[in-house]
Image (spheres, helix red, strand yellow):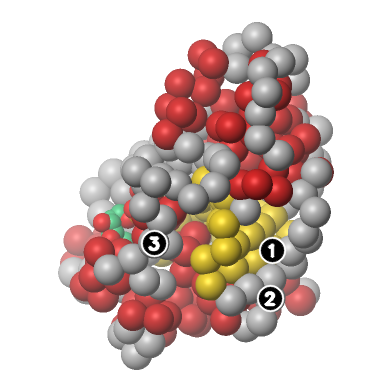
Amino acid sequence: MKTIAFCNQKGGVAKTTSTYALASGLAKKKHSVLMIDSDPQENLSQAAGIDLYNIPAATLSDVFKTEKGEPGADINEAVIPISKNLDLIIGGIEFTSADLDYSGVTSREFMLKRALKKLDKTYDYCIIDCSPTLALITQNVLAITDKIVVPMTPEAFATNGANMLFSWISVMSERLNNPDLDVAGILITNCRNTNNANIWLEGIEMLAKEYEIKVYKSIIHQNVAVEESQTLNQSLFEYAPNARATKDYEAFVKEFLKGESK
Ligand SMILES: Nc1ncnc2c1ncn2[C@@H]1O[C@H](COP(=O)(O)OP(=O)(O)OP(=O)(O)O)[C@@H](O)[C@H]1O
Ligand SMILES: [Mg+2]
């Protein structure tokens, strides 16, 4: 199983949107895919049609209870089928206070790694949506991640904090004993056709050059179909197969897979 995490501590840069698009795009191409919603905001789960007031399965928070010596759920009880070839595991709103809740757990950065080991079903890909923080749960994600995709929206402040993010990732790679952990590339998201966006696109290119990180050629343009699909709890491919952003994400899935085969 290859694990990809969408990570950027900057909020609102389309981490969730891109997670669902890549996961459902890979599932459409007949790969078996597990999505993990590690963000206590649970936006990915909601976008995938889950009623957050009545979650139909255990959450990772339920599974992690065993880490605190309490009776907890089995990881297999946390798997929710979403569509053909696509399953979801939800972290749970309780992750909001995870840093405090698990402060007494030994090697607490590896709780997710321990939990997933017991998963009966195996997948080709695990695609993970991170919260806009670099706290304990995101560390748990990076402990099991092979490649990180960093979404960036070309608008004011787009590159703020990116240097911190990249150096944090290399520190984590060492600390989590995950030497191959790496940034696969920067994905330009929610891109408007304005001069201001062009200025920030250049800024992102410069940053990428400095850190020797690839910027994916596929640019995701701003398109109202994205928000509409999320309002209706449908995947973009289902809701608007011919919309501009759908075509953009389709191109990204293709480019991603091409990178995989190298
Ligand atoms: N290509 C797009 N076109 C139009 N709207 C978009 C596009 N991509 C994302 N959005 C909108 O931008 C907002 C932020 O997207 P999203 O929730 O995916 O970002 P995020 O990085 O996951 O945010 P957070 O940091 O809060 O987790 C959402 O309202 C989403 O609908
Ligand atoms: Mg999100």
Viewer-nearest residue: 184 or 5: 5
Q: Secondary structure at mark 2?
A: loop
Other residues around mark 3 within 10 Å, as few (<14) / some (14–19) / many (≥20): some
Q: Depth-wise, is mark 3 or mark 1 nearer the camera?
A: 3
Task: Place residue 124 in its image quadrant.
Answer: bottom right
Q: Which residue is mark 3?
A: 49
How far is disc 2 from disc 3 in space, using C-alphas? Answer: 21 Å
Mark 3: amino acid? Gly
Q: Earlier in the sequence, mark 3 or mark 1?
A: 3
Label 2 to label 1, Cα distance in Å? 7 Å
Residue drawn at point x = 66 percent, y = 35 percent: 73
- Which numbered dot is residue 125? 1
Query: Are dots 2 and 1 in contact, CB under 8 Å?
Result: yes
Which residue carries the number 2 mark?
31
Q: Is residue 157 above or below residue 95?
A: below
Name the kind of residue labelled 1 in the image. Answer: Tyr
Q: Between tags 2 and 3, which lies in front? A: 3
Please, what secondary structure does the residue beneath circle 1 have? strand
Which quadrant of the rendered structure holds the N terminus? bottom right
Q: Is label 3 in contact with label 1 (beta carbons under 8 Å)? A: no
